[in-house]
Amino acid sequence: MQKMFLLIAALLVLQCASAQTVTGIWKTVDDASGEAKSQVELYEFSGKMYGKVLKTLRPNAAQICTSCPDERKNQPIVGMIILIDLVLKEGMWQSGNILDPEKGKWYGCKVWLKDGDPNTLVVRGSLGPFYRTQYWSRVR
């Protein structure tokens, strides 16, 4: 009985710990329409955060990035790494970049969990003094 209690306690601790990190799968939403756009997996590699598109959720959305710069041009959006080189500073992942595949532009980026809600990710893209903030939902 004691082993069962310890197992349940350990599982609860692991679940709470994983809910407090930005790593995982997130549903992105279109700013204008509020429509779900894609699922992006955020993962840490060599001390930096990256994000890869796992799937698109809009049936009529482009599947190839015709507007993308660099080696991403004319490549499938699914599987594309669109969030790169974020580093953890002052409690948030920042100083990296995010790609908007629809516009084919890179923006400065920082991400953090919304205060009091570990299932909402605040994603802020910036270009100079201008910025846009999105709220992504954790996929369970």
Image (spheres, grey):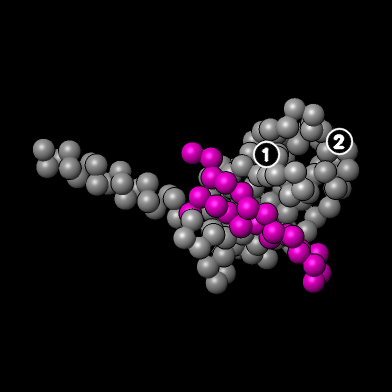
- Is 131 left, or right, of 118 in this rendering? right
Residue farthest toward the left in the current orientation of the protein? 1
Magenta stretch contains residue 15: no
Distance, label 2 to label 1, CA atoms, is 23 Å
- Element type at marker 1? strand
Q: Is residue 122 among the parts visible in the rendering?
A: yes
Looking at the rendered image, the disc whose residue lies closer to the viewer, 2 or 1, is 1
Q: Specify the segment rendered in magenta.
A: 118-140
Q: Position of residue 123 (x, y in %)?
A: 65, 57
Q: Say what amino acid the circle numbered 1 marks.
A: Ala
Q: Earlier in the sequence, mark 2 or mark 1?
A: 1
The image quadrant that residue 11 belongs to is top left
Q: Position of residue 30 (x, y in %)?
A: 73, 45
Judging by the rendered image, the residue that carries numbered circle 1 is 36
Q: Say what amino acid the circle numbered 2 marks.
A: Asn
Point 70% across, 34% down: residue: 56
- Is 100 left, or right, of 3 in this rendering? right
Judging by the rendered image, the residue that carries numbered circle 2 is 74
Q: Which mark is residue 11?
A: none
- Is 35 left, or right, of 118 in this rendering? right
Q: Main secondary structure of the magenta part?
A: strand
Quadrant position of the N terminus in the picture = top left
Magenta stretch contains residue 128: yes
Q: Position of residue 120 (x, y in %)?
A: 55, 52
- Crowding around mark 1 (Cα neighbors within 10 Å: few <14, some 14 to 19, many 20+) is some
Q: Nearer the viewer, residue 60 or 52?
A: 60
Q: Is residue 46 among the parts visible in the rendering?
A: no
Depicted 17 relative to depicted 89: above or below: above
